[in-house]
Image: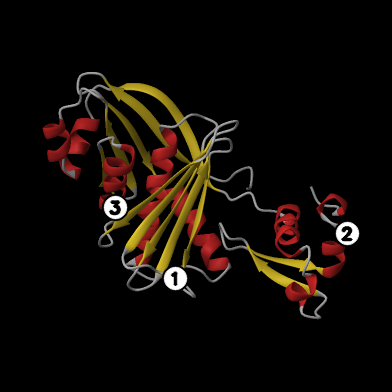
């Protein structure tokens, strides 16, 4: 990440009157960085899938803004027709959010599914799998919150590239929360709310030559010939962000601890 790279600021609020917590932020900087990355590696999807990816990245950022500062979360939305995966993940240690769209060699089940994993240091990771319908990203994630986490949440695009997540606390008025629209949610967010925190999220994966080499060694330590097939180097794609890396047989044999890159 460049030092002058712009970030998408997400504010977290508590609404004591309505018994809700809220995350709100503009995602222009996040989307711009995703576009540059995806275009560089020839992965930018066409519409309507680009808009779906935008919403998935926005949900990841809003979701992380209401989580502890050491949490990592990842989702894969597996769409049955056409077969494709939307992968997004985020790490609150670096306020980084990344993701990619898979359109080739995608395996699907009998229905579309949402897979979720969440991790915190010194704790067991949590996993969820949910059968879903359609392509409404907000609706899919609201269903995930209701069925897997049993917490009422609403997601809105309240203006162009500005998004909000409204999460009900135990005493929330469920009728009020369920009847919100993008317009009424925007009006409500202009009322007096208590700011908790602001976090700067940016498009960032964290992959580097050492990490990629370590992963490849873990997968092919006993079968290096199956990886290189006689070639001196092999091209590898980061599974999170899709960036291309070249792994040489010399570096593979030496190992990541001897790779002179931090």
On the image, numbered disc 1 is attached to which residue?
107
Helix, strand or loop at label 1? It is: loop
Look at 33% across and 42% down and name the residue there.
Answer: 148
Is residue 15 something that shows in the picture?
Answer: yes
Q: CA distance from mark 3 to mark 2?
A: 45 Å
Q: CA distance from mark 2 to mark 1?
A: 35 Å
Q: Which residue is mark 3?
A: 140
| Whole-percent x, y for residue 54 in the image | 39, 55
Circle 3: element type: helix
- Closest to the observer, 223 or 106: 223
x and y, in percent, of residue 123 in the image: 55, 32
Please give left or right for residue 237 compared with residue 90 in the image: right
Q: Earlier in the sequence, mark 3 or mark 1?
A: 1
**Above or below for 246 versus 213:** below
**Decide: marks 2, 1 in contact (CB < 8 A)?**
no
- The quadrant holding residue 252 is bottom right
Q: Residue at x 57, y 63 (%)?
A: 242
Single out the residue that lies furthest toward the bottom.
230
Q: Which residue corresponds to mark 2?
A: 254
**Residue sitting nearer the eye, 21 or 226:** 226
Residue 3 lies, in percent from the top left, at 64, 42
Badge 1 density bin: few <14, some 14–19, many ≥20, Cα 10 Å? few
Of marks 3 and 1, the one in the foreground: 1
């Amino acid at each position: 990440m460049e030092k002058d790279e712009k970030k998408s600021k997400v504010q977290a609020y508590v609404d004591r009157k309505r018994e809700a917590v809220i995350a709100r932020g503009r995602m222009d900087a996040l989307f711009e960085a995703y576009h540059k990355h995806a275009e560089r590696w020839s992965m930018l999807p066409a519409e309507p899938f680009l808009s779906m990816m935008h919403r998935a990245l926005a949900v990841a950022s809003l979701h992380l803004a209401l989580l502890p500062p050491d949490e990592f979360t990842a989702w894969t939305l597996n769409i049955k027709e056409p077969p494709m995966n939307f992968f997004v993940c985020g790490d609150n240690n670096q306020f980084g959010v990344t993701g990619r769209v898979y359109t080739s060699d995608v395996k699907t089940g009998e229905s579309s599914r949402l897979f979720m994993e969440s991790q915190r240091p010194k704790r067991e990771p949590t996993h969820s799998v949910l059968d879903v319908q359609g392509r409404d990203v907000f609706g899919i994630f609201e269903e995930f919150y209701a069925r897997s986490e049993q917490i009422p949440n609403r997601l809105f695009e309240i203006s162009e590239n500005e998004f909000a997540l409204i999460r009900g606390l135990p005493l929330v008025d469920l009728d009020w929360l369920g009847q919100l629209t993008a317009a009424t949610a925007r009006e409500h967010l202009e009322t007096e709310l208590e700011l908790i925190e602001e976090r700067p999220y940016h498009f960032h994966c964290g992959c580097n030559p050492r990490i990629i080499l370590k992963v490849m060694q873990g997968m092919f330590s006993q079968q290096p010939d199956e990886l290189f097939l006689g070639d001196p180097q092999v091209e590898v794609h980061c599974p999170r962000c899709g960036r291309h890396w070249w792994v040489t047989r010399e570096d593979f044999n030496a190992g990541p601890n001897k790779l002179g890159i931090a």
